[in-house]
Image (cartoon, rainbow, N blue to C red):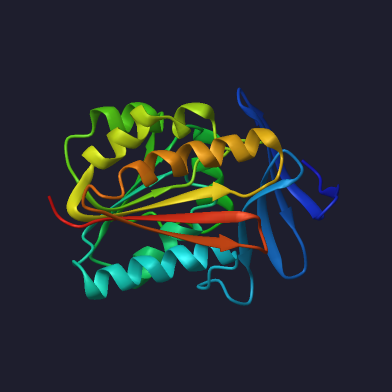
Amino acid sequence: MSNHTHPFGELIHQQHDEFGRLEVVETATARSLYFGSEVEQCRFMFDASMRLSLEYQQIMEAQILAHHQHNTPVQRILMLGMGGGSMARQLNTLLPNASIHIVELRQAVIDIAYDYFELPDLPEIEAIHEDALLFVQNALSRYDVIIVDVFDEKGIPKPFTQPPFQRDLRKNLSKKGLILFNLWANQTPEVQAQTQCVLDYWQSQFSHNILLNTYPILSTENIILSIQQQGI
């Protein structure tokens, strides 16, 4: 398709799947993936391709590296939600011996990550086209780090905010594993309820060998919830 103007740059790719519209938008300095026209999922900087450009991703990266250095070597990473694959690409560079499983509901998102955002086609990175809810219910192995970054145009789908999903997450976590949950701090009542539901569950687990920290990201209205298991 021919390029045309988008509110945030030049639209270089657009497609629809059963879940909505996907748009790849380019400016002179960056390429971004949008769900719909406003929800930016990934940003690839042309002059700094090996740097995460979104602040919430930088916080996640710092937490994973600190965990790797001070708690337990990170050998297995599970990512729920792909975006443009920038986090997987970065972690593969920093932790080249770690295996990374990325579970993504939308095959179109997987294709765009490889075609437009330079996700490496390597054996250490496995993209899995599956519902993340079903994957964590059925996974047979445990992970040192689990990243939950599952958004649609309205926020976090409700099943990912409920206790059954949180319990399944913990079942997939190694004894001293780390969960990083990307939450949204948008002030609409629906989004507030989504975020509070997740926070309430993990705060109720605080005394059960769990260490919690939250990192508000003012630039993008995100909150990173860090859930550190202390060994069980």
Q: Tell me where residue 109 appears, x and y as whole percent.
A: 54, 40
Quick one: 198 or 142, which is closer to the camera?
Answer: 198
User: Which residue is at a point 81% across and 48% down the rendered structure image?
Assistant: 3
Residue 3 placement, left or right of 195: right
Quick one: 68 or 4, which is closer to the camera?
Answer: 68
User: Which residue is at a point 12% across and 50% down the rendered structure image?
Assistant: 232
Residue 138 placement, left or right of 132: left
Q: Tell me where residue 91 appears, x and y as whole percent.
A: 38, 64
Residue 103 placement, left or right of 155: left
User: Which residue is at a point 32% across and 31% down the rendered structure image?
Assistant: 135
Q: Is residue 52 above or below residue 126?
A: below
Residue 216 placement, left or right of 28: left
Q: Tell me where residue 9 appears, x and y as whole percent.
A: 81, 57
Q: Quadrant of residue 1?
A: top right
Residue 154 visible here: no
Residue 87 visible here: yes
